[in-house]
Image (tube, grey):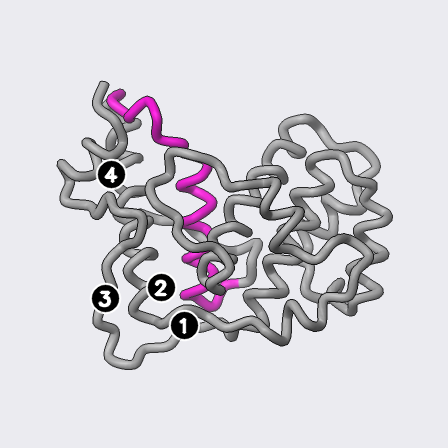
């Protein structure tokens, strides 16, 4: 079986750590940097509960930081749930890949590269994100987005890879080292960033 790098290159998709800029003629994203930073914090909390962190502590922190109103209905239901199946918790854990993608959009992650590896969880927790219980004002207020052409270049690569991955899956020849869940979460994050749908309503059509 070919590698993801060989497979992507065969489809004409950039395989470098950074996708090339796209000329967008001054086009801006639909989300301000502040909203993107807040979404990363919420995804961080959702993933943490998926990994077993006490949800009540997470809820109290989000409320104390006046972020609860930004938590989506599905996320609120997950955080409030008395019982969470292993499948639901696993899905919540994968949200850290969407978080990592949005952190790249904010310039807090250097590159995404091909979807053949998970994010650096230790760095995510220990270096990038505020610790639960800490204030988030500085993290949110200092947020800035990458240039639109840089964002669109990576978004285009992610979209194209997702299209080809679905075709490969149907044909039974998906590259062994391609991590589909990572790719899906990246696509989800970019669709939210560039669209107007609420988080729960994002579609990853290809």
Q: The N terminus appears in which quarter of the rendering?
A: top left
Residue 188 at x, y percent in the picture: 45, 51
- Give the CA separation, mark 4 to mark 1: 25 Å
Q: Provide the residue designation for mark 1.
A: 29
- Report whether 181 appears left or right of 85: left
Give the CA distance from mark 2 to mark 4.
20 Å
Residue 149: x %, y % from top left: 29, 69
Along the polypeptide, which appears first: circle 4 or circle 1?
1
User: Which residue is at 51% across, 49% downward?
Assistant: 98
For marks 2 and 4, give the one nearer the viewer: 2
Q: CA distance from mark 3 to mark 2?
A: 8 Å
The residue to which callout 2 is attached is 151
**Residue 17 position in % (x across, y down):** 31, 48
Q: Is residue 50 above or below residue 135?
A: above
Front residue of this view, candidates 146 and 185: 146
In contact (CB < 8 Å): disc 4 and disc 3: no
Q: From the viewer's perspective, tell me whether residue 116 is left or right of residue 89.
A: left
User: Which residue carries the number 3 mark?
Assistant: 22
Q: Which residues are magenta?
A: 172-197
* The one of 92 and 77 positioned closer to us in this rendering: 92
The answer to whether marks 2 and 1 mark residues whose Cβ atoms lie closer than 8 Å is yes
């Amino acid at each position: 079986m070919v590698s993801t790098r060989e497979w992507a290159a065969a489809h004409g998709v950039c395989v470098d750590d950074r996708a090339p800029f796209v000329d967008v003629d001054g086009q801006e994203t639909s989300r301000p940097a502040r909203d993107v930073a807040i979404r990363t914090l919420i995804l961080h909390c959702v993933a943490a509960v998926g990994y077993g962190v006490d949800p009540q502590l997470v809820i109290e922190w989000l409320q104390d930081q006046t972020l609860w109103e930004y938590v989506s209905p599905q996320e609120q239901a997950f955080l409030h749930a008395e019982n969470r199946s292993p499948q639901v918790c696993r899905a919540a854990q994968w949200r850290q890949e969407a978080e990592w993608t949005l952190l790249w959009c904010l310039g807090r992650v250097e590159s995404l590269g091909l979807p053949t590896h998970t994010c650096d969880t230790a760095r995510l927790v220990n270096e990038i994100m505020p610790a639960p219980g800490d204030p988030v004002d500085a993290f949110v207020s200092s947020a800035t987005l990458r240039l639109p052409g840089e964002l669109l270049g990576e978004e285009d690569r992610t979209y194209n890879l997702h299209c080809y991955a679905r075709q490969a899956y149907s044909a039974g020849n998906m590259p062994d080292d391609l991590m589909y869940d990572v790719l899906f979460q990246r696509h989800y994050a970019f669709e939210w960033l560039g669209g107007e749908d609420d988080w729960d309503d994002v579609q990853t059509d290809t």
